[in-house]
Image (tube, rainbow, N blue to C red):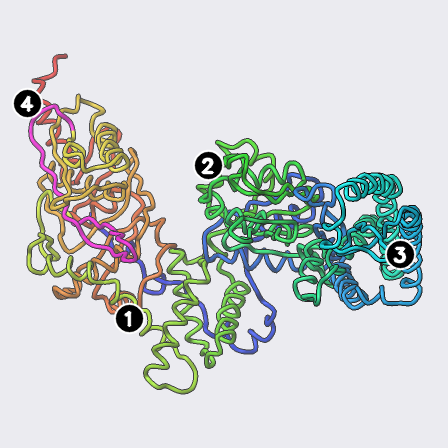
Amino acid sequence: MTINIESLKVPANALCAQFSSSLFSQSQVDQQQTQSFIGHDRAKEALEFGLSMPSSGFNVYAKGEHGTGRKTLIQQMLERYASEHGPADEWCYVNNFDDIQAPKKLYLNPGEGKVLLDKMSSLIDDLLSLFPEIFDNPGYQRQKAAIDRAFNEKYDSAIEEVETFALSKNVSVYEEKGEIGFAPLVDGKPLNDKEFASLSETDRTSFYQLLAELETLLSETLLELPLWKRESSVQMRKLKYDTAEQSIRPLLKELEREFASNLGILKYLKDVQGHLTEAVLDILVEEGSEGRDDKASRKLMVERFMPNLLVARKPDQGAPVVYEQNPTFQNLFGSIDYTAVQGAVYTNYRLLRAGALHRANGGYLLLDVEKLLAQPLIWSHLKLALKTGELSIEHPYAELSHGSSITLAPEKIPLKVKVILLGNAELYYTLQEYDQEFTELFRVLADFDRHVVNNNDNLAAYGTLIRQHAEKMQYPDVSDDAIAYLVRYSLRRAEHQLKLSANIVQINDLLDEAHFLYQKQGKTGSIEESDVHQALQAKARRTGQLSENWLQEIKEEQVLISTEGQAIGKINGLTVLEIGDSVFGTPARISATVYAGSQGVTDIEREAELGKSIHSKGVLLLIGYLGHKYGQSFPLSISANIAIEQSYGHIDGDSASMAELCALISAITKLPVRQDIAVTGSINQHGEVQSIGGVNEKIEGFYRLCFDKGLTGEQGVIIPKTNTINLMLNEEVMTAVEQGKFHIYAVDSIDQALEVLLGVEAGKRRRNGGYLKKTVHGQALVKLAKLSQMINGDDED
């Protein structure tokens, strides 16, 4: 029977997605100028629900890879939602005059904060200009003089009484340096010290007795002097206080009229009124001071009375949308700053700083969950804030600090914010499994696609996105063919003819590199397909050293790979090596040996502890296939070894299982395998071929080796038929296939692969359970029966 392997060949036009570059013409782009993203319909539905759901706990986890447009899509949706809502409220902290370590919160309508600050600043400036000059007015001076006069009259009256009595005893009264003294009189004249010393002992003694009597009288007369002074001082302080209060009251009344609709501000102004007069007298009215330092005085007034506005809002703006790139504790929850005053640490309500949650309060907050979880304490504090609906500013390690540490305990601010976390699938499922609170707080999953469906609308939209990037970067026009090349590159990144890669960043990066080469070469006009092709080749060269070294070792026969001839029990498998940014396909020789025994199929890679679990599973499936295919009429007894030659690292994946089975059957039947054809694909126990990954890199890797060694026109690759939809091969391979210099065979069963590799019909099972002797399976069945007989002897009826 003639073997028809031509029907298995994949035509050149099926090796890459086909579309016309006219899809990306400028007229098409103009129709979609507002295009900002494509695909992600499921994620958009989830976002619509999560962002509009008013109940608590419906925060959003946006799951997807970087570069898929998650952040762009979310920000655009948030801006739309934010524009539909009014601006968020303003909050500020004010001095708690009763407890300065517990600042009070103050609610403000949007836009009121700056007005309040301006008014309070003007109030302080007015006070600086009023005081102490306000005490120079005639009314105040008259009242002050009256208080002084009343005190002096009482004092003078008391002194006069003492003086009258002293004169009656020939003693004069005098006042020197604020002290009252007495001197004896002789002939109406007071004696000096020398004259007093010349008096007789009797006269001096009499004077001393009289002096004691006079001092006693003086003390009794001036007994109420401290009371008079206190009364005078109280009256003077009251006069100053009343004068200052009367001057300040109109200024505060004006503020009260300005903010009459805000009860919180009115209450705050009432608190200020009770302390402002005393502060003015303490700070602005300095007794016995020649001059006042207005700058220092203003600073003291500001530190006591100026509100600390956390976040200013504009009345005409929508709800806030905040993306915090660096979510440290302070950046997210705010901070308490400290300053040093004469070597001592000092803080007050004016040193409270807002965080991202304050800025986003009343709106939306975007956070990278990976960065969030990398910081200690943040995750637990964020969950607490979202659960309680309250936001506090505190030191992150306040509970660990010493009791003597100076800190603040400001009032908590009501928190109403929708949090959107940007993260990958691994973190999402980890949090969902190990953190019950995460499930309660982030109930909405916005799952972003890795791929976008390949249809004309999406292709045109994709081209629009690329052109928009070029316009944003102020690049020259990008030709339709160049856009088509970039879109094909996106399909290649997705490894699918019907799916575009959602990672537009990688595509834009290639355009950036193409523009760089375009500028470097001094070109003018549009960026063409050749520029993008050059950029892709340059990128491949930069990361291609490992692949070139590997191919060089094969050409030097350091690694034994044949691309011509035939060999028994040997086959070229295909592998993909991924090291950093370098991803390339390369052939690997797989060999199999068979001998009499009952040990089964031995996976040398597993025995050497180089084969990982999935690869070992693939080898074990071979045993199932052999038993199902050949062990129906006699006990299958075989000893075989399978190895991937010259492999010195760990091997995983089952994409070599089809090649291993072909090598094993070749070793059993002694039928030689073509070495000019490489094989990739996995199989199940029934011999059906299954899809594998990296098909493009594998094909291109073997083609490159064949090209370097010399194309014979017979070389090719066998792939699973289900992988034909993943083919996005480069132009060089497609041209070689079109010219008949290289061939790609798509198979869906192991039988088709055997016929291509061995050049013999695989054979179909007959009614009696056997196969024609000349077929592959017939020869395998005969050989296995002989091996079984050698091991088990003749069957007894």
Precedes in sequence: disc 2 or disc 4 = 2
Counting other residues with Cα less than 10 Å from the Cα at mark 3, is it few (<14), some (14-19), or many (20 or more)?
Answer: some
> Could you tell me which secondary element the residue under label 1 belongs to?
helix
Q: Which residue is mark 3?
A: 148
Q: Point out residue 481 in the picture as x, y percentages from the top left corner.
A: 42, 76
The CA span between labels 3 and 2 is 82 Å
Precedes in sequence: disc 3 or disc 1 = 3
Give, as a three-letter code, the residue at label 1.
Answer: Ala
Q: Which residue is mark 4?
A: 790
Q: From the image, state whether disc 2 or disc 4 is nearer to you.
A: 2
> Could you tell me which secondary element the residue under label 2 belongs to?
helix
Q: Is residue 581 magenta?
A: yes
Residue at x 73% of width, y 63% of height = 314
Q: Which residue is mark 1?
A: 538
The CA span between labels 3 and 1 is 97 Å
Which range is magenta? 572-600
